[in-house]
Image (cartoon, rainbow, N blue to C red):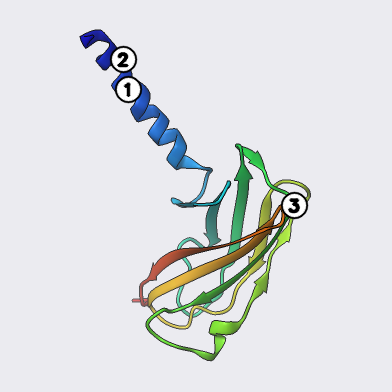
Amino acid sequence: MLRISYLFVPFVSSMLLIGCSGGQSDGKVQQAGAFFLSVNTIPNPPEVGSSAEVVVTIKADDQPSSHCKVEFRQFMPEMEMSSDKAVYTMVQEGASGVYKARGGEFSMGGEWVLEFSLACDGKAQTVKFPYSLKWPE
């Protein structure tokens, strides 16, 4: 029985790590139903006073999801701005499951959210990714 527990612990630990990874990104991965979204920005992290290219990879069953409509908006939860309602439609490159779009300007430092709306296989999901931006020095 002791031998089984020694084997079981590393197995469970490795399965937890695999389940949480979901894909390559800047550490921002979330699950939306059967889909895993990983998000990256260029530059990473986004910079105050400029816009960023936003890149999303969507996978299901560890395979690229290429039949999705993806949009996002960016906003500061603590500060209402007119740009909060701007929606950016993401374009997919081939059938890779990688979607890209350039967002609006990150006008100030503080807490920001990139909120993604995706429609895949007839199911709509919304996922939020928080970002903390520092004022330039």
Which residue was labeled with disc 3? 67
What is the spatial separation of the Cα atoms under label 1 and label 3, in whole angstroms?
36 Å
Which residue was labeled with disc 2? 7
Residue at the right extreme, as displayed = 94
Q: In the rendered view, does 36 fall on the left or right side of 93?
A: left
Residue at (28, 11) in percent of width and height: 4
Q: Position of residue 108 (x, y in %)?
A: 42, 82
Q: Position of residue 22 (x, y in %)?
A: 51, 42
Q: In the rendered view, does 112 fall on the left or right side of 37?
A: left
1 and 2 marks in contact (CB < 8 Å): yes
The answer to whether residue 109 is above or below residue 61 is below
Residue at (56, 86) in percent of width and height: 83
Residue at (65, 38) in percent of width and height: 63
How many numbered discs sit on the rendered protein? 3
What is the spatial separation of the Cα atoms under label 1 and label 2, in whole angstroms?
6 Å
The answer to whether residue 19 is above or below residue 9 is below
What is the spatial separation of the Cα atoms under label 3 and label 2, in whole angstroms?
40 Å
Residue at the left extreme, as displayed = 2
Q: Give whichever of 115, 54 is nearer the camera.
A: 115
Type of amino acid at the residue the image marks with label 2: Leu
Mark 2 crowd level (few <14, some 14–19, many ≥20, 10 Å Cα): few
Q: Does label 3 or label 2 sit earlier along the sequence?
A: 2
**Which quarter of the figure is the C terminus placed in?**
bottom left
SS under mark 1:
helix
Which residue was labeled with disc 1? 10
Residue at (43, 41) in percent of width and height: 20
The answer to whether residue 58 is above or below residue 87 is above
The answer to whether residue 128 is above or below residue 79 is above
In which quarter of the view is residue 101 placed? Answer: bottom right
Q: In the rendered view, does 10 fall on the left or right side of 21?
A: left
Type of amino acid at the residue the image marks with label 3: His
SS under mark 2:
helix
